[in-house]
Amino acid sequence: MPGTQSPNAASSAFPLLLLCVPMLVFFYLGLRERLHTGTFILVFSGFCLVLFAAAIDFTERLPELNGIPVFGANDPRRGIYKGFLGGFLGLMGLVLGAWWEIRLTRRKEAEDAKRRRLREAILASMGDVMIVVDRGNRILFLNPAAEKLLGKSSADIVGDDLRKHLPAKEMGKSGVRVILGIRQDKPAKDDPSQGEGRPQQEESDDLVMSMNVTPLQSDDGELSGTVRSLHDVTELAKVNQLKSEYVSTVSHEMRTPLTSIKAYLDLLLDGEVGELNEMQLEALHVMEGSTNRIIDMINNFLDLARIEEGIISFDRKPFVFDSAVSEAIEPLRNQFNEKDIRLKLNLPGRPLWVSGDRARILQVLTNLLSNACKYTPNGGEVGVSVMTDGQKVRVDVTDTGIGIAEEDQPKIFTKFFRASNNEFAGPVPGSGLGLAISKSIVEMHGGEIWFHSNPGSGTTFSFTLPRAGVSGPRA
């Protein structure tokens, strides 16, 4: 009858409907997971092709199926339906496997996104400036603190050369202080509104930043750039400046009475005011030594203040370095003799001419020799070697003293620092400024200074200076 479906047609449609189930399940899961990837489209299209091919093959090979639900052992339809059932279960397995893989992928993507948001939140909350640049010094990333400092958004300057926006010196070195060409705005004193982002009102200061540079490596271990983190130390720089000014003022005030004391001591020791007995002379010599130590300490304070303010000057002239070594040793000879320390000199056979301020180089030599004598026990040895090193003269001051503890070595050139192992040599006088000043003097002459120490067996301090005719940085 018209409109009545034959049993053959119904039974023919059943395997096709069975194959449609995995496809519909997969389509439903895809919609629920909001998948629009190429993989999902490809798999879904594959299901459609399988269904289409199965429909063609089925209708061509078995047009006469009559829909009997129970088959005999030898019935050919039994194998056909068994094959469709196996295909159905296989497709369902593929669907469930794909769904599980999709779930894992989505979960991993969600965790990665969460970690990314956490990193972004941490960078956004940092008060320090952080800028990432590639090997060509082009900006790759900057955090909100960097955007605020520069007054520009990431979108405007990513890809630009960092030096274009931070025209500061020493931008490639770590641990240095740089003064940026950026003004720190301050509100007017009478302005009740101190809102952020107001234009400059009355006064402004340069920002002083302490910078740390960290290498940035790619997945294969290659250097791909650097991370520059800058910390605002403007207020600390102001405090240090005030402290230096105070020390400089006090030192100047103390220098005047000490000059008078020194002058009268010299008169007494020279016999200008009458003859003195042995006990009086001994007392005056003790006073003279203490006065000289105080004067040296004051001079160190003043030198450090001049160095930090950048107002120290050098009288650069060529001079024979050998004579400077002898001149530095002579005032210390009594100290070496009192401790029975052998002094070993290794000087070149021909004169070595050095370009620099002779008085300042003498100051460096005196500091190193004095330290070697102080920290070398009785009966030890101190050696001075002078040699050429290319276009420079190299000096080694070696002792057989107590050495420098490993934990103290990174701080040995820090001002006011005293080594923690100095108690083994007894109380040692000094201000802790000699090595810091020596380092500054050597570097301002275009040289380098370093040391090597084995705790318990001695220390060698080395420095280089440009030979005459080879100019270094001018002070």
Image (spheres, rainbow, N blue to C red):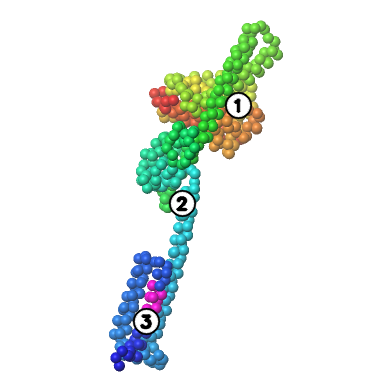
- Residue drawn 63% across and 28% down? 428
**Distance between the alpha carbons at the discs numbered 2 and 1:** 50 Å
**Residue at point 31% right, 89% down?**
3
Measured Cα–Cα span from mark 2 to mark 3: 51 Å
Q: Which x, y percent locates residue 136?
A: 37, 43
Task: Please name the residue that numbered disc 1 is placed on.
Answer: 430
**Label 3, label 1: how far apart the Cα atoms are:** 97 Å
Tell which of 469 and 80 is nearer to you.
80
> Which label sits in the foreground, 3 or 1?
3
Q: Nearer the viewer, residue 292 or 368?
A: 292
Instruction: Tell me where the magenta segment starts and ends, as one range.
Output: 16-27
Q: Which mark is residue 40?
A: none
* Residue 286 visible to the viewer: yes
Task: Tell me the crowding category of disc 3: few under 14, some 14 to 19, or many 20 or more residues within 10 angstroms, Cα based.
Answer: few
Residue 84: give x, y in percent of width and height. Answer: 38, 82
Of residues 422 and 244, the one nearer the viewer is 244
- Name the quadrant containing residue 86: bottom left
**Is there CB contact under 8 Å for labels 2 and 1?**
no
Position of residue 228 in the picture relative to residue 425 (left or right) = left
Question: As shown in the figure, which amino acid type bears the numbered disc 2?
Answer: Glu
Residue at left 29%, top 85%?
60
Element under disc 3: helix
Residue 96 found in image quarter: bottom left
* Image quadrant containing the C terminus: top left
Q: To which residue does mark 3 refer?
A: 17
Amino acid type of the residue that numbered disc 3 sits on in the rendered structure: Leu
Q: Which mark is residue 120?
A: 2
